[in-house]
């Protein structure tokens, strides 16, 4: 038995996978270059809905006002919103893992003096420019 598909579903001819580093300026440039060159219909980013707000956090490498990373900015939301989402989605273990990841990524970002996740923001900006659909995965 095959999986259900919408009536207008069309299997993609090509799938491109671009590996990135959250702190690499080269990754940001690669994301922008590949997306503008390929001009895909859909762009999949490795973000869950609870962390998707990171794509809208301005940084010093964009034309938007600077927002420094802090240990809760990974969620793109205020502290209590991130706590509530984590507990609702996975309980106390999920909250502990989220806090650990946030502390770790904030420490790395501070030591590298680079904003965390700029490649996500670059993907979002290009997707908006080229009229593609952004897909969270």
Image: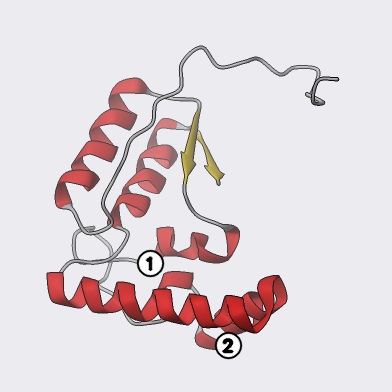
Q: Mark 2: give few (<14), some (14-19) or many (20+) Cα within 10 Å.
A: few
Q: Is residue 68 visible?
A: no
Q: Nearer the viewer, residue 28 or 109?
A: 109
**In the drawing, does residue 11 fall left or right of residue 133?**
right
Residue contact between numbered discs 1 and 2, judged by CB atoms under 8 Å: no
Q: Nearer the viewer, residue 126 or 113?
A: 113
Marked residue nearer the N-terminal end (1 or 2): 1
Please tell me whether residue 56 is drawn above or below residue 65 in the rendered image: above
- Where, by quadrant of the figure, is residue 2 drawn? top right
User: How far apart are labels 1 and 2 at the CA level?
Assistant: 17 Å
* Residue beneath the point at 15% across and 45% down: 26
* Residue beneath the point at 23% across and 32% down: 33
Q: Residue 131, how many percent across, how many down? A: 47, 32
Element marked by disc 1: loop
Element marked by disc 2: helix
Please tell me whether residue 68 is drawn above or below residue 121 in the rendered image: below
Q: Residue 77, how many percent across, how many down? A: 51, 76
Q: Residue 110, how many percent across, how many down? A: 19, 77
Pointer 1: what residue?
A: 57
Pointer 2: what residue?
A: 80
């Amino acid at each position: 038995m095959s999986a259900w598909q919408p009536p207008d579903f069309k299997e993609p001819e090509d799938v491109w996978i671009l590996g990135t580093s959250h702190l690499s300026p080269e990754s940001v440039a690669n994301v922008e270059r590949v997306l503008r060159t390929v001009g895909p219909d859909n762009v999949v980013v490795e973000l869950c809905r609870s962390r998707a707000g990171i794509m809208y956090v301005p940084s010093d490498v964009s034309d938007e006002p600077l927002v420094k990373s802090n240990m809760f900015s990974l969620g793109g939301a205020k502290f209590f919103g991130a706590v509530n989402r984590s507990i609702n989605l996975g309980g106390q273990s999920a909250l502990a893992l989220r806090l650990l990841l946030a502390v770790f990524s904030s420490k790395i970002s501070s030591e590298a003096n680079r904003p965390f996740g700029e490649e996500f923001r670059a993907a979002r900006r290009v997707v908006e420019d080229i009229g593609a659909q952004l897909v969270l995965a």
